[in-house]
Amino acid sequence: MSNDQLLRKKSLDMSFIKGIFGCGMTGFTQEYFTPFLLLIGASAFHIGFLNSLSNLAASLVQLTSAELTQLLGSRKKFIGLSVLLQSLIITFMVVFVFSGDTHIGIFISLVILFVSFGNISNPAWVSFLSDLVDVNNRGAYFGWRGQYLGILTVATMGLAGFIVDRMGHIDSRSGFALIFFLALACRLLSFFFLGKMQEPVLVFRREDQFSFFEFFGRIKESNFVKFVLFVALMNFTVNLAAPFFAVLMIRDLSFSYLLYTLIIIIAPLTLYLTIQRWGRHADRTGNLKIIRLTSRLISLLPFLWIICRHPLYLIPVEMFSGFLWAGFNLCTVNYIFDAVSPQKRTRCLAYFSVVNGLGLALGAFCGGYLVNHLPELFGYKILMLFLVSTVCRLFVSFFFIRTVKEVRKPDRSHRSAEIFFSMIGMRPILGIDRRRAMRM
């Protein structure tokens, strides 16, 4: 093994340890901002407003990601700076919770800053990490990495829910203060291990620089820009409903924090248990086929919540959700790696994140408005919003992806039914596998 390969292997090892603590921070924070806001009196509109502004801010700050990376001359330095700033915001959150303050606007502002500092360096981090991984092994590697780090995230989310639920019998705020403090400790440790990574040399060339408007202006001829638009529209339709599942469970269905935690960890746990399998399938079949299949099935997920809301029913629904999102998320990232050269990757990832973030922000904003103006469905306005989200998802997943083409040629052609049944470990029934039936 050459010296360069040894350095890359060491950096990947350090990135994995960094990822362990990064996942710890995510598990202690991401799913508990909404419950804390509901605790201090926030409404469904506040939750929609928070999700809209946080996604908008997270996307807009990434417009400067490529320039700031180039200004500092290093992706690693830029990532380190954003980690420290995010740590500072978590410190303010801990102080806010301990102080007993109930000003909803202040906490929403802190969450927006937390998300912004966490996302501003994402394009640089993904570019950094992708340069360390062999191009022919990305699907398998990121599937493996995502699986183990993801399971840790779920475990941390479960621990956070247990802490908040148990300490809620004494003082609910103290439980949130403790999990946010643990998130701070994890973030500082991730900064330590980032410092032990070696960054591959990246030459900044003038021809690789282009503005956001130049990028999006190529929508007619650029396959990648069409792909970016599809993902943004898909996430717009998803975020019409996504912020309000927590509101439905905690406010409308009166789930305890422990039951809420159990429901929310099922999907990511399934996601991380199946993501490695999706990665191997993506390397063989191509990313776009999996994206087409999963996006259409993802469209049905809100409708499943309309049918029934009993916890025992929601558990398999969330398992199905995690299974589908594993394929969609992994193949979306891998498609970008295949479609964009390393020199342009940081900038293209930033612009992808901007457009995608705008879709998420607009979706949350529209959802926050509609949830108060739609008629009730089975006694809940949120369920009518879920129906609207389902219809919109189906429209985008069937019509907008048709303009996107596969970048990397797969080993052989696979039908969607073959991929789906192969993923769940079953052979397709005769009526579905039409080509095999015709040969018999």
Image (cartoon, grey):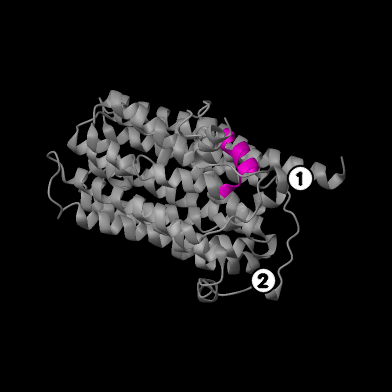
Magenta span: 275-287
- Residue receiving disc 2: 208
Q: Residue 376, labelled with which disc?
A: none
In reply to whether residue 285 is colored magenta, the answer given is: yes
**Location of residue 281 by image quarter:** top right
Q: How many marks?
A: 2
Mark 1: which secondary structure? helix
- Discs 2, 1 touching: Cβ within 8 Å: no
Q: What's the residue at 69%, 75% (across, down)?
A: 207
**Location of residue 168 by image quarter:** top left
Q: Amino acid at mark 1?
A: Arg
Q: Nearer the viewer, residue 268 or 41?
A: 268
- Residue receiving disc 1: 8
**Location of residue 330 by image quarter:** top right
Separation (CA) of disc 2 from disc 1: 25 Å
Q: Nearer the viewer, residue 65 or 342?
A: 342
Q: In the drawing, does residue 3 fall left or right of residue 366?
A: right
Q: Indicate the quadrant containing the C terminus: top left, top right, bottom left or bottom right.
A: top right
